[in-house]
Structures are given as C-alpha cells and as structure tokens.
Image: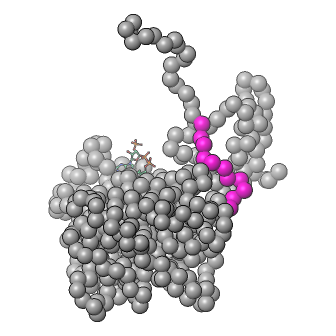
Amino acid sequence: MSEESITLTDNRSGKSVTVPIEHGVFSSQGVRELDPGLFFYDPAFKSTASCSSSITDLDGVNGILRFRGYPIEQLAEKSTFLEVAYLLINGELPTPAQYEEWVHHVTYHTYIHENTADFIKGFRYDAHPMGMLVSVVAALSTFYPESKQIHDPQIRMIQAIRLIAKMPTMAAFAYRHSVGLPREYPVNHLTYTGNFLRMMWNVADPNYEPNPVLAKALDLLFILHADHEQNCSTTTMRTVGSAGADPFISVAAAASALYGPLHGGANEKVIRMLHEIGDVKNVAAYVDKVKKGELKLQGFGHRVYKNYDPRARIIKKTADDVFAVTGTNPLLEIALKLEEVALSDDYFIERKLYPNVDFYSGLIYEAMGFPMDMFTVLFAIGRTPGWLAHWLELVQDPEQKIYRPRQAYIGPDKRDYVPIDQR
Ligand code: ACO
C-alpha cells in the first residue's frame, strides 16, 4: 500500500475500501470493489484520468509544461520542431545520427499521392481549409491500407513519419485551392517550416527563400503546440485509436475535435474579437459585457491552467521578433490592453482566467500573412506529433481497452408501445 490513500465508504452497505493514491490519482477499481454496478458521474471528464502517460507533464496550478521531462521553455529556446517531434514519438532526444535520419525520413515523405491532392480540387472555392484537411487526412488511410496493421511497430512508425511529413503539404494545398493558386510542391533543401512557408507563399520564383526569422518563429509556434496531454483532440485520438482504427483516421478525428471553436478554433476567434473591439478605448466596455456573461473573452481561460499559460508567455516574446520583420500588428495594442484590464479585474482573478496559448498566436499568424481560417490548420500541423505519440503509447499499453464510458440513465422507466392511431 502506498503512503497516500483514500478511504471510501458505501453508506448503503457499510462496506469500506482503502485505495492507494499514486501519481495524484486513485483507481476506479476501488469503487468497483465496493459495488461493481457503481460509476462516477463526471461530465466532461473534469476529474477523470483516462490513462497513464509518460509524454507530457502539465501542472496547471503552477503553470508548468514539460515534454518527456524537458521544460517547454528550454525546448522553445534550444530545440527544433522536428527534434521535439522525435522526442515526443520516441521518448528521448535524438543523437546527431538519429536526428539526421529522422529529418531525412520526414523530408522524403512530404509528397502526397496526386489523387489525394486532386480531392482538394473538388471543394468549393470558399471551403474552410480545416474541413479540407480533415477530409484529406482521412482519405490518406485508403492510400496506405497497411496502416491498419497497428500492432506492427515498423508499420506504425512509417505512418507516424508520413503524417508529420504530409500535414504541411495538405495544409498548403488546401490554402492554395482557396485562393485559386496552383499547388507548390515540396522541395528537399529547405527546413520543415521553411518548406511549408514556400508551399504557402511562393508564386513562380524558382529561387524562393523563406524569411529565416519567420520560419524560426513558426517552428517555435509548432513546438509550443506539439502536445498538451489529454486535451479534447488528443482524447479523441485515443478514443478512436482505442477501437483499433488506423492513425490516419484517428488523426482525422482528432483534427475534427480541434476544429471546434472552444479548442483549436479559439485563435481565429481571438482575432475576430480584437477586430470587433476595434480600438483600445473600447476595451473596458467589452470587458463589462464579458463580466455580464454576454460574451466570452476569447483566448482566456483553460480547463487545466489556473495560472498564466507558459506557452502564451513564450509566444508574447516571439511576437517582437516577428513584428520586427512584418511590421507590428495594430491589434497588438488592443490585446495588451485587454490582458492588462482583465488581469486586474476581480471577475478574472476569482475565476483564475489568464491568457492561453491562443491569445497571442493569432496576432503572429496574422502578421505573417496567414488568413484567419488557416490558424487552426497551423495548430493541427504542430499538434500532429503529440496526437501520434499518444496513439503509439495507447496501442502499446496493456491496460488500455476500447474506450467505453458509462452513463447515468435519466430517461423514462419501462412503458408500453402505443400504436400511432391511439396517441
Ligand atoms: N471569458 C469569460 N468568462 C470565462 C471564460 C472566458 N474566456 N472562460 C471561462 N469563463 C468563466 C465561466 O463563465 C465560468 O464562470 P462561472 O463560474 O461564473 O459560471 C468560469 O469562468 C469557469 O469556466 P468553465 O466554462 O467552467 O471552464 P471550462 O474549463 O469548462 O472551459 C474553456 C475552459 C473552454 C477554455 C473556457 O475557458 C473558454 O471557453 N475560453 C474561451 C475559448 C478559448 O480560449 N479556448 C482555447 C482553450 S486553449 C486550447 O484549446 C488550445
């Protein structure tokens, strides 16, 4: 028995059970021992640890985020997105030889089958790129039928590499479709983010070179988004993956969850909100509306962070580097004022509402020239290694089974069917 434990008593039977507390959780098995027909009622899984994981350590009270033990601040300063992807997927930082091989593999899997690319042509000109991305990722499953062999480690790894490699290509192709530009195919001499920027913006320049400051900033933003333990999209990835679905289908499902405005869609909503506020002098009136419950302050609040989101702090610093290249985003002044007003207001203090990762990321994306509906797509590219790391962990975890929660049934008791002409 571990030193910490909790004792549960069933007042109906007088039976008690003492359950150890390990890693901040106690097992539901203890409750099942009291009464196998008894379940926790935990809507939105606010108090449920659905798995054990060794990927991301998130302490929301103290604002701490670590990937495989490495603080996000150190990874943001010293690493690259592809190295972080390797770390998430493999559990350790790569040696120089491992890194070189990893980058080589990712670089040489960036092309997507032409038929897949052609699907994008079928979308309406104004289709949301996130809708296109979700559909095309799902379609990739049909091009790699071997991906269904989820118990083969080598096959699993090649799909992970394919997904990380192809996400930027699909994302850029979706964007080019929305503006009527021909596809710009990947090249092998550029970095992961440099290549993506080229696929996004290059028009007819064989010597196009992405701006290194912007490529570096985007790389950093991808690092910050790379994982965040059991968030809505990762839980979706695990739920779909737990049924034995292949990783393409599982990533399509995870990306669908990310598409929701309360999750990955929030950075788009932040920019719309800042445009709506329009001027620093309107900030106080806007905050009053939020306090009356008429609106939500987009980019504020988080299910887990009850402190400043460490990712938001890092992004805020990066904004200066980006704005030095792009010119400042006029919305920045409004955002800074909004943060200042909110952080000194009792409504936000009492509820522990702080800026989250989305509050500043949209400002940078907008300054870089990304249209608003690409913001969630950028989040999806960054989050792909995290989704895959969780999927890989899930399929190798002997304690995991198909996800299947229970419910508290509150509908009618048994009643007899009445023929329609007698109702
Ligand atoms: N603006 C104003 N009030 C808020 C906000 C906000 N952004 N967020 C929470 N609150 C209030 C709620 O109204 C509630 O107040 P009450 O106790 O008086 O009813 C209280 O704070 C607690 O909020 P919940 O909704 O219970 O918190 P929950 O953990 O369910 O929601 C969420 C978290 C969805 C992130 C929420 O804070 C929100 O909607 N924020 C805006 C959208 C956003 O920025 N999403 C991005 C999240 S980060 C990510 O996905 C990468």
On screen, residue 147 above or below 71: above
Nearest the eye: 42 or 193: 193
Nearest the eye: 59 or 420: 420
Q: Residue at x 38, y 68 (%)?
A: 115
Inspect this view and state whether residue 171 appears.
Answer: no
Q: Which residue is most to the top?
A: 422
Is residue 230 shown left or right of residue 350?
A: right
On screen, residue 379 above or below 402: below
* Position of residue 420 measured from the top left corner of the image (x, y, whole percent): 39, 12
Q: Main secondary structure of the magenta part?
A: loop
* Position of residue 328 measured from the top left corner of the image (x, y, whole percent): 23, 77
* Position of residue 406 measured from the top left corner of the image (x, y, whole percent): 60, 36
Residue 388 belongs to the span the image colors magenta: no
Q: Which residue is most to the right?
A: 1
Q: Residue at x 43, y 10 (%)?
A: 419
Residue 401 belongs to the span the image colors magenta: yes
Nearest the eye: 126 or 140: 140
Q: Residue at x 30, y 79 (%)?
A: 184
- In the picture, the quarter occupied by the C terminus is top left
Q: Which coloring applies here? A: one colour
* Position of residue 192 measured from the top left corner of the image (x, y, whole percent): 43, 81
For residue 414, which quarter of the picture?
top right
Which segment is the magenta one? 396-406
Is residue 392 shown left or right of residue 284?
A: right
Q: Which residue is most to the front?
A: 115
Q: Residue at x 34, y 63 (%)?
A: 119
Inspect this view and state whether residue 422 appears.
Answer: yes
Is residue 366 shown left or right of residue 359?
A: left
Label count reads: 0
